[in-house]
Image (cartoon, rainbow, N blue to C red):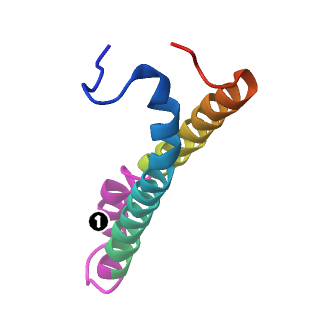
Amino acid sequence: MFYHPVVSASSLPILTILQWPKWQAIAALDIFTESLIFVIAIQLVYSLHMRLLAKFLVVMAFSARLPVIAIAGVRLYYMNERIRGASCKQFQHGPSNE
C-alpha cells in the first residue's frame, strides 16, 4: 500500500473527507461533458442531408459513451458511501492512539 511520507495512516480518512468536493466536481464535469457531446452530435446530425439510417448510425456511435454517465454516477455514490463510512468510524471510535 502506498503511503505519502508526510501523511500518517490515521489521518487518511480526514484527507478523503476534505477531497470529497473535488471528486464531486470531477464527476459532475464528466457527466456534463459526456451529455454535451451526445447532444451536440444529435444537433449536428439532425441538419445533415443524408439517409436516416446513416444519421442513426452516427448518433449510435456517439451514444456508445453514454454508459460513462451511469458509471460516473455509481462511482460517485459508492465513493460517498466509503467516505461517510470512514468518517463515521473515525468519530465512533474516537481518535486513534497509533
Q: Which residue is mark 1?
A: 54
Count all numbered tags in the image, as a single digit.
Answer: 1
User: Which is the main secondary structure of the residues drawn in magenta?
Assistant: helix
Q: Nearer the viewer, residue 78 or 10?
A: 10
- Up the image or down, 39 lies above or below 47; here it is above
Q: Amino acid at mark 1?
A: Ala
Residue 8 place in picture, x, y as percent:
38, 24
Which residue is found at the position 29% from the left and 63% from the top? 58
Q: Nearer the viewer, residue 31 or 93?
A: 93
Residue 17 place in picture, x, y as percent:
53, 43
Q: Nearer the viewer, residue 27 or 86?
A: 86
Which residue is found at the position 45% from the left and 39% from the top? 15
Residue 4 image-quadrant placement: top left
- Residue span colored magenta: 44-67
Residue most toward the right? Answer: 92
Residue 10 place in picture, x, y as percent:
48, 23
Q: Is residue 26 rendered magenta in the image?
A: no
Residues packed near mark 1 inside 10 Å, few (<14), some (14 to 19) or many (20 plus): few
Where, quadrant-wise, is the N terminus in this rendering?
Answer: top left
Q: Secondary structure at mark 1?
A: helix
Residue 63 place in picture, x, y as percent:
39, 56
Q: Nearer the viewer, residue 45 or 25?
A: 25
